[in-house]
Image (cartoon, rainbow, N blue to C red):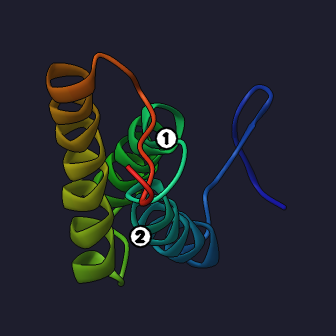
């Protein structure tokens, strides 16, 4: 483990790959449940992975767009139903 600054370690390639994959998965799951929590987390992880030059750039971009879609779905649900949840049963 190499230290770059006091108390900070250099981020490895595997860390950025994990952030890209996690943002994609959280954004995808966020479309179905907890979009007000998982959407912003997916956006932050995707942004961090992209800023650190992840080799999984496309997956990070998908995570970013899915996180944004989570927020849009939340806004549409709040406008249509006045709630942050939805149900298939109506």
Mark 2 Cα shell of 10 Å, populated few (<14), some (14-19), many (≥20): many
Task: Identify the secondary structure beneath mark 2.
Answer: helix
Q: How far apart are marks 2 and 1 (CA)?
A: 10 Å
Q: Position of residue 58 (x, y in %)?
A: 22, 81
Q: Residue 11 carries which label?
A: none
Q: Where is residue 84 in the image (x, y as percent from the top left)?
A: 41, 27
Q: Which residue lies furthest to the front in this view?
A: 90
Q: Residue at x 29, y 34 (%)?
A: 74
Q: From the viewer's perspective, is 78 left or right of 85?
A: left
The quarter of the displayed image where residue 53 is located: bottom left
Q: Position of residue 65 (x, y in %)?
A: 19, 58
Q: Give the residue number, with chain letter if any, for mark 2.
A: 24
Q: Residue 41 carries which label?
A: 1
- Count up the numbered dots: 2
The quarter of the displayed image where residue 31 is located: bottom left
Q: Position of residue 48 (x, y in %)?
A: 40, 47
Task: In the rendered view, tell whether residue 63 sits above or below residue 18.
Answer: above
Q: Which residue is drawn at 43% across and 42% down?
A: 35
Of the numbered discs 2 and 1, the one sitting upstream in the chain is: 2
Task: Identify the secondary structure beneath mark 1.
Answer: helix
The quarter of the displayed image where residue 44 is located: top left
Closer to us: 38 or 89: 89
Tags 2 and 1 in contact by the CB under 8 Å rule? Answer: no
């Amino acid at each position: 483990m190499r230290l770059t600054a006091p108390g900070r370690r250099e981020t490895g390639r595997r860390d950025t790959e994990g952030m890209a994959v996690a943002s994609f998965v959280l954004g995808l799951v966020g479309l179905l449940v907890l979009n007000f929590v998982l959407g912003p987390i997916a956006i932050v992880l995707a942004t961090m992975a992209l800023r650190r030059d992840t080799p999984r750039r496309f997956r990070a971009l998908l995570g970013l767009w899915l996180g944004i879609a989570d927020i849009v779905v939340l806004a549409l649900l709040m406008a249509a139903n006045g709630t942050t949840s939805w149900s298939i049963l109506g």
